[in-house]
Amino acid sequence: MDKSNEHNKCMLEFMVKRFDKAAFQHLRESHKLSQEGLSRELDISGHTIYRWEAGKAKPSQMAVSAIIQKYGQEILNDNFYVYYMRE
């Protein structure tokens, strides 16, 4: 694995561990999306979004990656995963 891929994997692992359910919910609500609406955008189940926001589960690395690809700038602006953006 090259250094870039290794760095990205470490960052995703870190983000999953530091997942902030309140900040995630704020991000969703700031886009005026229901849990079901966001689940359609990310191609996951609405129940999964509910579990993340209720603190019953954390997103996988693949889900975090999808969130970043969809909401990268908003994540930075809303301090959702500001730690990810620091290098």
Image (spheres, rainbow, N blue to C red):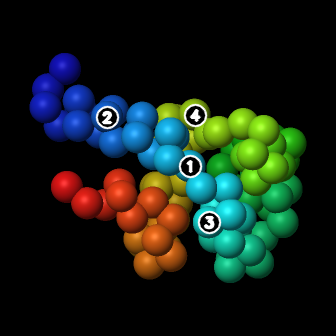
> Residue at image x 39%, y 64%?
82
- The vertical placement of 81 against 64, above or below, is below
Residue 60: assigned label: 4
Question: Between marks 1 and 2, how big is the CA–CA gap?
Answer: 14 Å
In this figure, which residue is indicated by the disc labeled 3?
23
Amino acid beneath label 4 = Ser
Disc 2 element:
helix
- The vertical placement of 35 against 18, above or below, is below
In this figure, which residue is indicated by the disc labeled 1?
19
> Residue at image x 14%, y 26%?
2
Mark 4 or mark 3: which comes first in sequence?
A: 3
Residue 10: assigned label: 2
> Residue at image x 67%, y 56%?
21
Name the one closer to the observer, 70 or 82: 82
Amino acid beneath label 3 = Ala
Mark 1 or mark 2: which comes first in sequence?
A: 2
Query: Looking at the picture, how far across and down is residue 40, in whole percent?
Result: 76, 52
Mark 1 or mark 4: which comes first in sequence?
A: 1
Disc 4 element:
loop
Question: Between marks 4 and 3, how big is the CA–CA gap?
Answer: 17 Å
Name the one closer to the observer, 74 or 78: 78
Q: Nearer the viewer, mark 4 or mark 3?
A: 3
> Residue at image x 56%, y 49%?
19
